[in-house]
Amino acid sequence: MGQYACRNRAAELFNPDDPGSPFSTLAQRVLNFEIDERADIKGGIRDAEWSNVSVNDCKFERCHHKNGCLFYDMRAKINARVNEIDFIIVNQDLLIRDLMKKKEGTRGLITERPALIVIDEAHNLEAKVRDARTLEFTFRGICRILDDAVQLLMKKSGDKSLLSQSKFLKKCVERIFKQIGTDLFRAAKQDSDRIKVSEIKETPLTRVSHVLKDLSLSLSVLTSRNEREIDDVYEAMNGLISLIDVLAGAEDNYLIWASKPLQEATVSICPKDISQFLKHTLFHGKTSVILTSATMCQGGETLEEQYSYLTQSLGYRGDYMDRKPSPFDYTNHAMMYISNHVPHYHHDRREIYLESAYKEMVKLCNLTQGRTLVLFSAKEDMKYIHKKLMSSANTHAWAVHVQKEGSSQDGVIAEFRASKGVLLSTGVFWEGVNIEGSDLSQVIIFRLPFPVPSDPIYEYKSLVAENPFMDVFVPDMLLRLRQGSGRLIRSETDLGVLSILDSRLSGAAKKNYREQVLETLPFKNVTEDFSVLERFVQQKSIKRRV
């Protein structure tokens, strides 16, 4: 939904008295059919702005704008009957949403009986399922759910007591979010921080749950009409019940945390274990499923060992195909350089690490005359380095680019290729980016992409693992590292260097995961000697072509 423009919301946002305001201008462009999707906006748009006009609570058949809506048209096509369409291509998010709806007994998003499901980039499936099954609640969002439910039920029964029930629920929710706001003010250092929610006091959570369950029961009668809007409200109401039960301590199968994205207090809940969900909805044997990815395997003697981290996380039971070697000549075309003198990263000495890594990074970028993609695992590190580079931009022989906020990075990639400069990036650039040829001759991994230990998901996975570091953190890091390193060699003729500025991977550090990294990555030439790297670059003529 978030990628499509909603003309219904744009019409509400447009202010004819102030047509020149940024919001009115954006809304007008949506209403004029200049923008159907987020990708239509050249140069991108900030999340906070786009969220005002993106599809949110779709009215589907009741919407006046449905005939010209790309979102509505897409949803109708993917729900086609079996004999009307041969192939349906969707992203993982939509597939998972479909599985969830069918599990809940409501109308699915995709055709009912696919003969075969092929999931590409299957290494992302666990995270995608967790994201999809993570329910986020804001005070305004909950009020909207309650208003929609009451409106639907009032149409059916005319029961005015529903209004007093809604008033009671909103007052209780307001108290809950007042306390969550206090928790965030005390504990969150930045908006992206996920913090623990303290015990909710002075709110009758049990009574709130009972009232919500009564409303849900009434809605369940209406779902037989098979209208998507009713299904969506019913589903949202059941999610709200889960939140209240988690807060009340009556439900312990969920993780819960608070954060403040887009400057609004948000509480999130997520099931602890997603493997059971996938077993029952995807790997139940009624539909054949093929999982594919270039980075599913890790070290191990048997196929079971090589696939073990992913299969255990997903609850997969089935056959394995032999691991296929890369079609590219890594032996002659690429070298991996591990920096052994950048100090280890510690949060309380972060600046010492960043200053040392910055100097090494500049030296490496000079070696390949730019044409370098730098991958960061922390936005704060990327911002620090970007600021430092821009303050001394005149001293570098290459241009500096940084990824833009938004869904499409095509613009910044085109700028990078044209200038043959240095591109600082994180997030989406670790995978799916394809820059062939000499425009990209080096990938720098700024820091090994270990997950954040305090993240609620990894905190829980650590609790249930025998050896949390080797069973959870290292395999997760290896998956992401393989994806990031895969940005370098994209064709049979590509030449390049993978540089890692994390000295924990050096031989002197003697970390027990070093051998796993070397075994997992396809690079055969590995060095910690900068002069050896220089000779390789010269011998292979990895030079800038004007």
Image (cartoon, grey):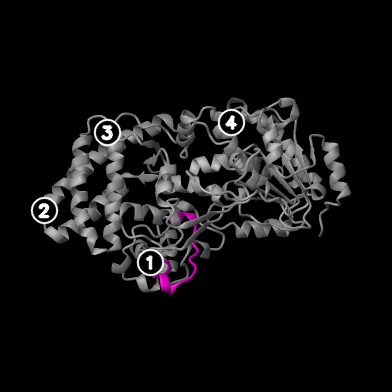
Badge 4 or badge 2: first in the primary sequence: 2
Tag 2's secondary structure? loop
Question: Which residue type carries mark 2?
Answer: Lys
Seen at 32% across and 65% down, the residue is: 60
- Image quarter for residue 439? bottom right
Badge 4 or badge 1: first in the primary sequence: 1
- Position of the N terminus, as image quadrant, is bottom left
Q: Which disc number belongs to residue 180?
A: none
Badge 2 or badge 3: first in the primary sequence: 2
Seen at 50% across and 41% down, the residue is: 313
Closer to us: mark 2 or mark 1?
A: 2
- Horizontal relation, residue 222 to residue 30: left or right: left
Q: Label 4 vs label 3: CA separation?
A: 35 Å
Badge 2 or badge 1: first in the primary sequence: 1
Which residue is under mark 3?
A: 248
Badge 3 or badge 1: first in the primary sequence: 1
Question: Which residue type carries mark 3?
Answer: Ala
Which residue is under mark 4?
A: 470
Badge 4 or badge 3: first in the primary sequence: 3
Q: Label 4 vs label 1: CA separation?
A: 50 Å
- Position of the C terminus, as image quadrant, is bottom right
Which residue is under mark 1?
A: 7
Q: Which residues are the magenta region?
A: 72-94
Question: Which residue type carries mark 4?
Answer: Met
Which residue is under mark 2?
A: 160
